[in-house]
Amino acid sequence: MKAVIFDLDGVIADTARFHFIAWQQLAADLGIVIDEAFNEELKGISRSESLERILIHGNQSDRYSEGELAVFANKKNEVYLELISSLSEKDILPGITAFLDELATADIRIALASASRNGPFILDKLGLSDRFETIVDPSGLKAGKPAPDIYLAAAAQLGLNAGDCVGVEDALAGVQAINAANMVSIAVGDAQELAEADHIFSSTALLDLETIQGVWEAAHHA
Protein backbone atom coordinates (compact mmCIF):
# COMPACT_ATOMS: atom_id res chain seq x y z
CA MET A 1 0.00 0.00 0.00
CA LYS A 2 1.57 3.23 -1.19
CA ALA A 3 -1.19 5.85 -1.09
CA VAL A 4 -4.50 6.80 0.49
CA ILE A 5 -6.88 8.80 -1.70
CA PHE A 6 -9.55 10.77 0.13
CA ASP A 7 -12.98 12.05 -0.70
CA LEU A 8 -13.62 15.45 0.91
CA ASP A 9 -17.22 16.09 1.95
CA GLY A 10 -18.04 13.94 4.96
CA VAL A 11 -14.52 12.49 5.16
CA ILE A 12 -12.16 15.42 5.70
CA ALA A 13 -14.76 17.97 6.81
CA ASP A 14 -18.51 18.12 7.29
CA THR A 15 -19.25 20.32 4.29
CA ALA A 16 -22.14 18.12 3.11
CA ARG A 17 -24.58 20.14 5.24
CA PHE A 18 -23.60 23.30 3.33
CA HIS A 19 -24.28 21.56 0.02
CA PHE A 20 -27.73 20.62 1.30
CA ILE A 21 -28.56 24.17 2.39
CA ALA A 22 -27.43 25.55 -0.99
CA TRP A 23 -29.31 22.93 -3.02
CA GLN A 24 -32.41 23.34 -0.88
CA GLN A 25 -32.37 27.08 -1.47
CA LEU A 26 -31.99 26.67 -5.25
CA ALA A 27 -34.70 24.00 -5.35
CA ALA A 28 -37.08 26.27 -3.43
CA ASP A 29 -36.44 29.05 -5.96
CA LEU A 30 -37.57 26.59 -8.66
CA GLY A 31 -40.62 25.52 -6.67
CA ILE A 32 -39.14 22.14 -5.72
CA VAL A 33 -39.06 20.78 -2.17
CA ILE A 34 -36.12 18.57 -1.14
CA ASP A 35 -35.43 17.16 2.31
CA GLU A 36 -32.43 15.58 4.02
CA ALA A 37 -33.52 12.09 2.94
CA PHE A 38 -33.44 13.15 -0.72
CA ASN A 39 -30.10 14.87 -0.13
CA GLU A 40 -28.56 11.45 0.58
CA GLU A 41 -28.98 10.75 -3.15
CA LEU A 42 -26.76 13.72 -3.96
CA LYS A 43 -23.79 12.58 -1.86
CA GLY A 44 -20.62 12.01 -3.84
CA ILE A 45 -21.97 13.01 -7.26
CA SER A 46 -21.18 16.03 -9.42
CA ARG A 47 -22.90 19.41 -9.36
CA SER A 48 -24.50 18.90 -12.78
CA GLU A 49 -25.81 15.44 -11.89
CA SER A 50 -27.14 16.71 -8.57
CA LEU A 51 -29.06 19.45 -10.39
CA GLU A 52 -30.39 16.90 -12.87
CA ARG A 53 -31.69 14.69 -10.04
CA ILE A 54 -33.36 17.65 -8.32
CA LEU A 55 -35.13 18.64 -11.55
CA ILE A 56 -36.30 15.05 -12.12
CA HIS A 57 -37.54 15.00 -8.52
CA GLY A 58 -39.55 18.17 -9.22
CA ASN A 59 -40.81 16.95 -12.63
CA GLN A 60 -38.89 19.76 -14.35
CA SER A 61 -36.21 17.78 -16.18
CA ASP A 62 -37.10 19.04 -19.68
CA ARG A 63 -37.96 22.62 -18.81
CA TYR A 64 -34.60 24.40 -19.04
CA SER A 65 -31.87 25.04 -21.61
CA GLU A 66 -28.20 24.14 -21.10
CA GLY A 67 -27.50 27.81 -20.47
CA GLU A 68 -30.16 28.03 -17.78
CA LEU A 69 -28.84 24.87 -16.13
CA ALA A 70 -25.36 26.41 -16.02
CA VAL A 71 -26.79 29.54 -14.36
CA PHE A 72 -28.57 27.40 -11.75
CA ALA A 73 -25.42 25.39 -11.00
CA ASN A 74 -23.37 28.58 -10.61
CA LYS A 75 -26.03 30.12 -8.38
CA LYS A 76 -25.91 27.08 -6.09
CA ASN A 77 -22.12 27.23 -5.97
CA GLU A 78 -22.14 30.92 -5.06
CA VAL A 79 -24.39 30.19 -2.07
CA TYR A 80 -22.20 27.23 -1.11
CA LEU A 81 -18.98 29.27 -1.30
CA GLU A 82 -20.53 31.93 0.90
CA LEU A 83 -21.51 29.27 3.45
CA ILE A 84 -18.04 27.67 3.54
CA SER A 85 -16.14 30.97 3.65
CA SER A 86 -16.05 30.68 7.44
CA LEU A 87 -14.51 27.17 7.44
CA SER A 88 -11.41 26.73 9.59
CA GLU A 89 -9.33 24.02 11.25
CA LYS A 90 -12.10 23.50 13.81
CA ASP A 91 -14.27 22.04 11.02
CA ILE A 92 -11.88 19.15 10.30
CA LEU A 93 -13.68 15.93 11.24
CA PRO A 94 -12.51 14.02 14.34
CA GLY A 95 -9.38 11.95 13.92
CA ILE A 96 -8.49 13.21 10.44
CA THR A 97 -5.47 15.32 11.41
CA ALA A 98 -4.03 12.47 13.48
CA PHE A 99 -4.65 10.00 10.64
CA LEU A 100 -2.92 12.28 8.12
CA ASP A 101 0.02 12.51 10.56
CA GLU A 102 0.11 8.71 10.79
CA LEU A 103 0.17 8.38 6.98
CA ALA A 104 2.95 10.97 6.64
CA THR A 105 5.06 9.22 9.29
CA ALA A 106 4.66 5.94 7.39
CA ASP A 107 5.56 7.61 4.05
CA ILE A 108 2.13 6.81 2.66
CA ARG A 109 1.25 9.31 -0.07
CA ILE A 110 -1.96 11.35 0.11
CA ALA A 111 -4.29 12.60 -2.63
CA LEU A 112 -7.75 14.15 -2.91
CA ALA A 113 -10.46 12.77 -5.20
CA SER A 114 -13.52 14.93 -4.55
CA ALA A 115 -16.40 15.58 -6.93
CA SER A 116 -16.31 19.15 -5.62
CA ARG A 117 -14.44 21.67 -7.75
CA ASN A 118 -13.90 23.62 -4.54
CA GLY A 119 -11.47 21.07 -3.10
CA PRO A 120 -8.36 23.30 -3.18
CA PHE A 121 -10.29 26.22 -1.61
CA ILE A 122 -11.67 24.03 1.18
CA LEU A 123 -8.32 22.40 1.99
CA ASP A 124 -6.78 25.86 2.19
CA LYS A 125 -9.53 27.01 4.59
CA LEU A 126 -8.92 23.93 6.75
CA GLY A 127 -5.15 24.50 6.75
CA LEU A 128 -4.55 21.10 5.13
CA SER A 129 -3.29 22.05 1.65
CA ASP A 130 0.28 21.02 2.38
CA ARG A 131 -0.83 17.54 3.47
CA PHE A 132 -2.07 16.55 0.00
CA GLU A 133 0.43 15.74 -2.71
CA THR A 134 -2.12 16.05 -5.51
CA ILE A 135 -5.75 17.03 -6.08
CA VAL A 136 -7.81 15.75 -9.00
CA ASP A 137 -9.70 18.41 -10.96
CA PRO A 138 -13.14 16.81 -11.48
CA SER A 139 -14.03 19.20 -14.32
CA GLY A 140 -11.58 17.40 -16.60
CA LEU A 141 -13.10 13.94 -16.17
CA LYS A 142 -15.38 12.14 -18.63
CA ALA A 143 -17.55 10.61 -15.91
CA GLY A 144 -18.17 11.30 -12.23
CA LYS A 145 -18.64 8.84 -9.39
CA PRO A 146 -19.68 5.97 -9.34
CA ALA A 147 -17.44 5.70 -12.43
CA PRO A 148 -13.80 5.08 -11.47
CA ASP A 149 -12.34 8.02 -13.43
CA ILE A 150 -11.50 10.28 -10.48
CA TYR A 151 -9.70 7.54 -8.54
CA LEU A 152 -7.80 6.35 -11.61
CA ALA A 153 -6.79 9.97 -12.24
CA ALA A 154 -5.53 10.32 -8.66
CA ALA A 155 -3.40 7.18 -9.00
CA ALA A 156 -2.05 8.43 -12.34
CA GLN A 157 -1.18 11.84 -10.85
CA LEU A 158 0.75 10.03 -8.11
CA GLY A 159 2.44 7.83 -10.71
CA LEU A 160 1.09 4.69 -9.02
CA ASN A 161 -0.86 1.62 -10.05
CA ALA A 162 -4.46 1.63 -8.82
CA GLY A 163 -3.79 -1.58 -6.89
CA ASP A 164 -1.25 0.24 -4.71
CA CYS A 165 -3.91 2.70 -3.51
CA VAL A 166 -6.70 2.76 -0.96
CA GLY A 167 -9.72 5.08 -1.27
CA VAL A 168 -11.71 6.58 1.62
CA GLU A 169 -15.36 7.58 1.10
CA ASP A 170 -18.57 8.27 3.00
CA ALA A 171 -21.03 7.78 0.11
CA LEU A 172 -22.08 4.69 -1.84
CA ALA A 173 -21.32 6.31 -5.20
CA GLY A 174 -17.78 6.95 -3.97
CA VAL A 175 -17.29 3.40 -2.68
CA GLN A 176 -18.48 2.07 -6.04
CA ALA A 177 -16.00 4.36 -7.80
CA ILE A 178 -13.13 3.02 -5.67
CA ASN A 179 -14.18 -0.58 -6.31
CA ALA A 180 -14.51 0.07 -10.05
CA ALA A 181 -10.94 1.41 -10.02
CA ASN A 182 -9.81 -1.92 -8.46
CA MET A 183 -8.62 -0.18 -5.32
CA VAL A 184 -9.31 -1.24 -1.74
CA SER A 185 -12.34 0.71 -0.50
CA ILE A 186 -12.57 2.13 3.02
CA ALA A 187 -15.88 3.68 4.03
CA VAL A 188 -16.89 5.92 6.91
CA GLY A 189 -20.51 5.79 8.01
CA ASP A 190 -23.47 3.44 8.05
CA ALA A 191 -22.55 -0.23 7.65
CA GLN A 192 -25.72 -1.14 5.77
CA GLU A 193 -25.60 1.76 3.32
CA LEU A 194 -21.89 1.23 2.62
CA ALA A 195 -21.84 -2.58 2.65
CA GLU A 196 -20.01 -2.72 -0.70
CA ALA A 197 -16.85 -1.33 0.92
CA ASP A 198 -13.94 -3.61 1.84
CA HIS A 199 -13.97 -2.17 5.37
CA ILE A 200 -16.24 0.28 7.19
CA PHE A 201 -15.43 2.58 10.10
CA SER A 202 -18.42 4.07 11.90
CA SER A 203 -16.55 7.35 12.42
CA THR A 204 -13.52 9.22 11.06
CA ALA A 205 -12.22 9.19 14.65
CA LEU A 206 -11.63 5.45 14.28
CA LEU A 207 -9.55 5.57 11.08
CA ASP A 208 -6.45 3.52 11.73
CA LEU A 209 -3.51 2.81 9.43
CA GLU A 210 -2.76 -0.63 10.86
CA THR A 211 -6.33 -1.79 10.23
CA ILE A 212 -6.39 -0.36 6.70
CA GLN A 213 -2.99 -1.88 5.90
CA GLY A 214 -4.36 -5.23 7.06
CA VAL A 215 -7.43 -4.89 4.81
CA TRP A 216 -5.20 -4.02 1.84
CA GLU A 217 -2.88 -6.97 2.49
CA ALA A 218 -5.81 -9.37 2.86
CA ALA A 219 -7.25 -8.14 -0.46
CA HIS A 220 -3.95 -8.69 -2.25
CA HIS A 221 -3.35 -12.14 -0.83
CA ALA A 222 -6.89 -13.42 -1.30
Image (cartoon, rainbow, N blue to C red):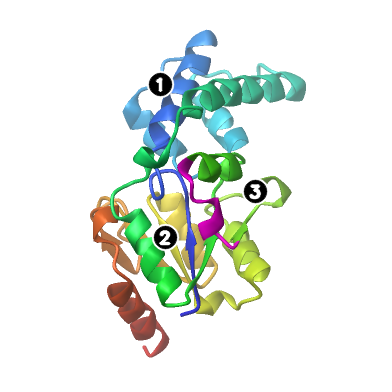
Residue at the limit of the structure toward the bottom, as seen here: 221
Residue under the image location 45 percent in, 19 percent down: 24
* Residue 168 disc label: 2
Residue 7: x %, y % from top left: 47, 53
Q: Examine the rendering and report whether any part of residue 46 can be seen.
A: yes
The residue that mark 3 highlights is 138
The residue that mark 1 highlights is 34
Left or right for 139, reference 10: right
Above or below: residue 193 compared with residue 2: above
Report how far apart the C-alphas of labels 3 and 2 lie in the structure: 17 Å
Between 67 and 92, the one lying in front of the other is 92
Amino acid type assigned to the residue bearing label 3 in the image: Pro
- Say which quadrant the C terminus sits in: bottom left
Q: Nearer the viewer, mark 1 or mark 3?
A: 3
Identify the secondary structure beneath mark 2.
strand
Residue under the image location 34 percent in, 69 percent down: 198
Q: Examine the rendering and report whether any part of residue 61 can be seen.
A: no
Q: Nearer the viewer, mark 1 or mark 2?
A: 2
User: Mark 1 or mark 3, which has the lower sequence index?
Assistant: 1
Check contact, mark 1 vs mark 3: CB within 8 A. Answer: no
User: Mark 1 or mark 2, which has the lower sequence index?
Assistant: 1
Report how far apart the C-alphas of labels 1 and 3 lie in the structure: 25 Å
Residue 140 on the magenta span: no
Amino acid type assigned to the residue bearing label 1 in the image: Ile
Residue 92: x %, y % from top left: 37, 45
Label 1 CA crowd tier, 10 Å (few <14, some 14–19, many 20+): some
Left or right for 151, reference 25: right
Label 2 CA crowd tier, 10 Å (few <14, some 14–19, many 20+): many
Q: Which residues are magenta?
A: 126-133
Residue 130 on the magenta span: yes
Residue under the image location 48 percent in, 46 percent down: 127
